[in-house]
Image: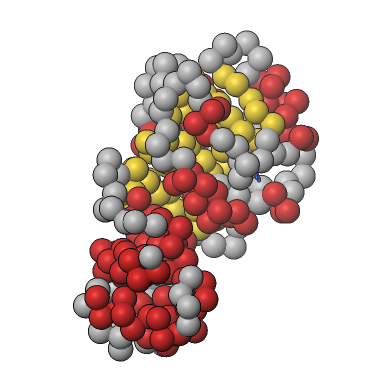
Amino acid sequence: MRAKRSLGQNFLVGSHYPRRIVDSVAPQAGETIIEIGPGQGALTGLLVETGARVIAIELDPDLIPHLSQSFSDCEHFRLVEADALRVDYCELIAPDASARVVANLPYYISTPIMQRLIEHRRCLSEMTLMLQREVVERITASPGGKEYGFLSVLAQFYCEVEKLFDVPPGAFRPAPKVYSSALRLRARARTAAVKDEVLLIELTKVLFAQRRKTILNNLRAGWGKLGLADASGIFGPLSASGLDPRRRAETLSIEEIARLADAITVSRA
Ligand code: SAM
């Protein structure tokens, strides 16, 4: 079957990388594992062999018959034809209260899927994802470098992040143009308290909107998105959080961004 570029179909071939991914997850018999985008089943077969309860979510109707047939005699496998961006993961895994996720993600939606998984972190304790290497570098970046930005703050605020290993283009058919990397995200038991999580995400987008500008200039340009009355409304929160307005966003730690978000929330009240 021809791979559909529109659905980000780059299938893993051979057994080396599928095995490495599944070994790094080490599924336990009986636990629930969600696989997003099983495709032709490269990871699915190995996951099912472990005795874990596997729930696979696939959007492409053309892949469904082959997948259902391949695992038809397996009681602990369930195939769900759905869009992974719309699934309610906590409902899907019932009666279990917690599951882990494994996915060689379609790159065209990797950021929104990661965002959705993080939103469901109360029932998703860990996610092992294959993404473009460049995206993994951004997710795992520390403050101070050019890779550090919206994705780093979003992922690291909620999760512990760990790059596992690189995967070359030749491991897929068709081969993508770039390297991929496997990444592990572990939901933090406790995230730093922030009064308004939606504001934290908006603020991070505003701060990094133009990386070469100071945070003051970005905040002045984005005051409307932060629910402030006007551009001058940013001075109070900046001073309350003790941040030098001449800094650039890439120098801010996640705690500093959270502190500024809280100061904005207080000033809006
Ligand atoms: N897991 C397989 C592998 O490693 O060979 C396939 C990975 S392929 C990169 C991505 C898979 O995600 C494809 O099977 C594609 O049809 C599926 N997919 C794309 N968009 C999706 C979505 N919104 N929800 C669920 N599956 C999706």
Identify the residue at horizontal 42%, vertical 16% (top origin).
Answer: 30
**Does 116 sit left or right of 65 as displayed?**
left
The image quadrant where one finds the N terminus is: top right
The one of 26 and 34 positioned closer to us in this rendering: 34
Can you tell me which quadrant of the image ligand 1 is in? top right
Indicate the position of residue 9 as horizontal and vertical percent values.
66, 47
Identify the residue at horizontal 69%, vertical 39% (top origin).
Answer: 59
Indicate the position of residue 62 as horizontal and vertical percent values.
78, 35
Q: Is residue 111 above or below residue 231?
A: above
Indicate the position of residue 232 as horizontal and vertical percent values.
41, 86
Identify the residue at horizontal 74%, vertical 49% (top origin).
Answer: 4
The image quadrant where one finds the C terminus is: bottom left
The one of 83 and 233 positioned closer to us in this rendering: 233
**Does 158 sit left or right of 54 as displayed?**
left
Q: Is residue 2 above or below residue 231?
A: above
The one of 198 and 93 positioned closer to us in this rendering: 198
